[in-house]
Image: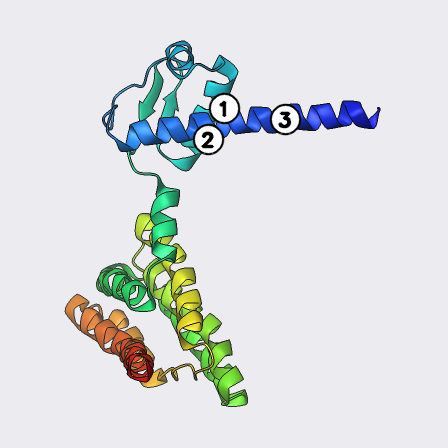
Amino acid sequence: MSSAHSGNDTLQTAGRRSLVDTAIEQLREQLSAGVWPVGSRIPTEHELAERLGIGRNTVREAIRVLVHAGMLVSRQGEGTFVRSTSDPAAVLRGVQRSGVRDVLEVRAALETEAARLAALRHTPEDVRRMRAALAREAEVFAAHPERAGREATVEHDLEFHTAVVEAAHNPALAEVYRYFGASVREAMRAAFGDHEMPEVVMATHQALVDAIESGDPERAEQACRALLAEPTAAVEQLIAAIAARK
C-alpha cells in the first residue's frame, strides 16, 4: 500500500471520528438540557441523522457511546431510552477537580452509612477480611515506620476501608466508593506533597471492626466518624499551615 493511500485512510478515519465526537457532544448537550426526559424514548436514528445533518451510521455510533456511558439504554424492538440526563464521566471529572477536604467529606458520608449497614449485614468472612487488612497494614508500618512506611500503608488502609464498605453488601454503594477510594488516595498524596502523611492509628480501626462485629449500627457509625476524624484533622491542619504561609 502506498504511503499516500495510507495517509488518506488516516485522514478519513480522523474525519469520521470527529463527526462521531461532534454527534456525541450534541446529543449529550440535549440530554443535559432535558430535551428528552429520563425514561422517554429519543427520536429514531433516521430522525436524529436529519436533525444533526449527519449519516445514520455516525448517529448509531454516537448512541452506542452514550449507552456505554450510562446516559441511554437500548431496548430491542422498542428503541433507545433516556437513562440519565447527566454524564457520569463528567460527574467523576468534577470530583477529580475537587479539593482534598471536599473528597474527604463525601468519603465520610459514604463510609459512615456503609459502617452502619455493615453492622447489620456483615458475615464472618467480612470481619476476617477487615482484620486481615489491618494486620497487613500494621506489619508494613512496623517494618517501615518512616515516611515511606506511612505512604505504603495508604494502599493497605484503602484495602481495609473497601472491606468495610463491601461488608454493607450494597453493590451500588461499593461501586461509588471504589471510585472515591482512588480519589481520596490521590487527593491525600497531592495535598501532603512534601509534607509527612498522617499516621494511621490502629486503635480506631480496630474499634470500628469491633463495633461492626457487635451488630450495633449506631456504635459502628460513631466508631467510623471517630476514625475519619483523624485524617480530616490532619488535612485541616495542613490547609491552615499552607494558608498561613501565603
User: Toward which corner of the image does residue 51 lie, by quadrant?
Assistant: top left
Q: CA distance from mark 1 to mark 2?
A: 6 Å
Question: Tag on residue 166?
Answer: none
Q: Secondary structure at mark 3?
A: helix
Labelled pair 1, 2 in contact (Cβ < 8 Å): yes
Q: Callout 3: few (<14), some (14-19), or many (20+) C-alpha neighbours within 10 Å?
A: few
Residue 20 horizontal/vertical position (percent): 50, 26
| Most foreground residue, 143 or 229 | 229
Vertical arrangement, residue 34 with respect to residue 58, above or below = below
Labelled pair 3, 1 in contact (Cβ < 8 Å): no
Residue 177 horizontal/vertical position (percent): 35, 57
| Most foreground residue, 45 or 240 | 240
Classify the position of the C terminus by image quarter: bottom left
Query: In the figure, is residue 34 to the left or right of 7?
Result: left
Residue, disc 2: 65
Residue 141 horizontal/vertical position (percent): 48, 85
Residue, disc 1: 61
Query: In the figure, is residue 143 to the left or right of 178?
Result: right
Q: CA distance from mark 3 to mark 1?
A: 14 Å
Ranked by sequence position, the earlier of labels 2 and 3 is 3
User: Toward which corner of the image does residue 245 lie, by quadrant?
Assistant: bottom left
Q: CA distance from mark 2 to mark 3?
A: 17 Å
Q: Secondary structure at mark 2?
A: helix
Vertical arrangement, residue 202 with respect to residue 90, above or below = below
Q: Identify the residue shown where x is 38% and y is 27%.
A: 26
Ranked by sequence position, the earlier of labels 3 and 1 is 3
Residue, disc 3: 13
Q: Identify the residue shown where x is 34% and y is 65%.
A: 164
Residue 103 horizontal/vertical position (percent): 31, 63
Classify the position of the N terminus by image quarter: top right
Which amino acid does the dot numbered 2 rest on? Val
